[in-house]
């Protein structure tokens, strides 16, 4: 539910030397770490450093691991993020803030976004190539880890046509595109769930 959100301090107090000694090295390497509070509750803010990019699955694992260690809510601060990642993060109940655009912190019951945020483009029908990719993955052989270039060559399509087909599948929440350079596909549902999910979208 949309709501008015009180001023939210996304700067906070940087990690001190004393705190740094006990903080996992991975997070110090990949994030700028600071501490703040929301409505009197202490929070830890993680802002990715330059070049730091993680999938929603990775962010969820990081949030769980660090919260278990420091015992206060972890909130990621992003300057920008693809829309499909925003929705996947929300589905996985990952706490995050995008200044001026989105605040999603389920641990505090917050779900706010800018009023003119564009609505998600609904996938009503899959393209022929998207169908082909899914059916091949389900019936012929796994496409996990394949790059867009490899798939374009396999199915004799252009890079952009293959990219658009995978984006449609991703908007359905069935796969993720990851990796730089060379985007790769990772399916996030098992075959049984994939079959159930795609049935209404198949071309007749």
Image (cartoon, rainbow, N blue to C red):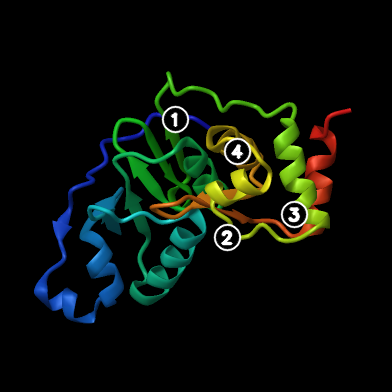
Residue at 71% x, 61% y is 142
Quadrant containing the C terminus is top right
- SS for dot 3: helix
Asked which quadrant contains residue 189, the reply is bottom right
Mark 2 sits on what residue?
Answer: 145
Residue at 29% x, 77% y is 24
Of callouts 1 and 3, the N-terminal one: 1
Q: Which mark is residue 137?
A: 3
In the image, 131: left or right of 30? right
Q: Position of residue 104 (x, y in %)?
A: 43, 43
Q: Residue furthest top?
A: 116
Mark 4 surroundings: few (<14), some (14-19) or many (≥20) residues within 10 A: many
Q: Residue furthest right?
A: 204
Mark 4 sits on what residue?
Answer: 162
Asked which quadrant contains residue 75, the reply is bottom left
CA gap, disc 3 and disc 2: 12 Å
CA gap, disc 1 and disc 3: 42 Å
Q: Nearer the viewer, mark 1 or mark 3?
A: 3
Of callouts 2 and 4, the N-terminal one: 2
CA gap, disc 2 and disc 4: 15 Å
Residue at 27% x, 54% y is 51
Mark 1 sits on what residue?
Answer: 3
Of callouts 1 and 4, the N-terminal one: 1
Mark 1 touches mark 4? (CB < 8 Å): no
Of callouts 3 and 4, the N-terminal one: 3
Mark 2 surroundings: few (<14), some (14-19) or many (≥20) residues within 10 A: some
Mark 3 surroundings: few (<14), some (14-19) or many (≥20) residues within 10 A: some
CA gap, disc 3 and disc 4: 14 Å
Q: Nearer the viewer, mark 1 or mark 4?
A: 4
In the image, 165: left or right of 198? left
């Amino acid at each position: 539910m949309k709501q008015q959100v009180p001023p939210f301090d996304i700067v906070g107090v940087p990690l001190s030397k004393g705190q740094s000694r006990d903080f996992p090295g991975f997070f110090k390497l990949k994030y700028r770490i600071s501490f703040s509070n929301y409505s009197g509750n202490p929070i830890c803010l993680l802002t990715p450093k330059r070049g730091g990019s993680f999938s929603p699955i990775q962010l969820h694992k990081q949030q769980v691991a660090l919260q278990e260690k420091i015992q206060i809510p972890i909130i990621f601060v992003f300057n920008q993020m693809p829309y499909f990642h925003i929705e996947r993060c929300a589905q996985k109940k990952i706490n995050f803030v995008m200044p001026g655009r989105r605040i999603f912190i389920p641990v505090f019951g917050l779900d706010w976004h800018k009023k003119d945020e564009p609505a998600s483009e609904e996938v009503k029908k899959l393209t022929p190539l998207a169908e082909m990719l899914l059916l091949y993955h389900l019936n012929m052989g796994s496409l996990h880890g394949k790059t867009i270039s490899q798939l374009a060559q396999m199915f004799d399509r252009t890079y952009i046509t293959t990219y658009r087909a995978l984006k449609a599948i991703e908007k359905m929440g069935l796969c993720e595109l990851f990796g730089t350079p060379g985007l790769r596909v990772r399916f996030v549902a098992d075959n049984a769930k994939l079959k159930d999910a795609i049935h209404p979208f198949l071309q007749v």
